[in-house]
Amino acid sequence: MYLSVQLSYYPLNDDYKPPIKDVIARLEASGLEVHANRMSTQVFGDYDTVMAVLADTMKWSFQTFGKAVFVANFLEGDRRPRA
C-alpha cells in the first residue's frame, strides 16, 4: 500500500531552524520521496517503510532536540505532486 503524508514539525526551543533542517535531512536520507516547503514536508512511499521512518525520526528528534510537536496528515494512495 502506498502512503502520502504531510508532516509539520515544531521544535519547542528558541533556535528552531537547525532541528527542522536536520529532521528534513534525515527524512531525505531515508530513501523515501520527500518534498519540503515553507509550511510542511510531504513524504511518500510504501506504508510500512514510511511509518517506520517516521517513528525512527520522531524518536531521534525527541532524543536529540527535546520537546517538539509533530502534526501529520495521512492519506492512503499516491498523492505526489505532478509536474
Image (tube, rainbow, N blue to C red):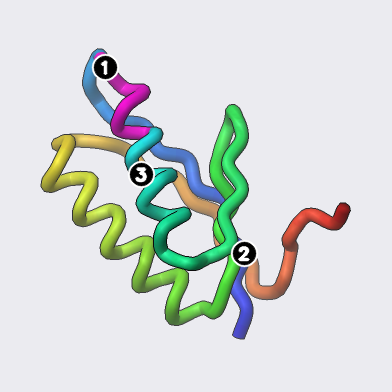
Instruction: Evaluate if marks 1 and 2 touch, with contact meaning CB atoms under 8 Å apart.
Output: no
Question: What residue is shown with label 3?
Answer: 23
Where residue 26 appears, as percent x and y from the top left, is 36, 52
**Amino acid at dot 3:** Val
Where residue 56 appears, as percent x and y from the top left, is 27, 63
Q: Please, is residue 60 above or below residue 2 in the view?
A: above
The residue at the point 41 percent across, 71 percent down is: 51
Question: Magenta includes 18?
Answer: yes
Kindly give the residue lying farthest to the top in the view shown.
14
Q: Nearer the viewer, residue 67 or 50?
A: 50
The residue at the point 17 percent across, 36 percent down is: 65
Q: Please, is residue 18 above or below residue 2 in the view?
A: above
Question: What residue is shown with label 1?
Answer: 15
**Count of numbered circles in the view:** 3
Instruction: Give the mark nearer the N terminus: 1 vs 3.
Output: 1
Residues in magenta, as a range? 15-20
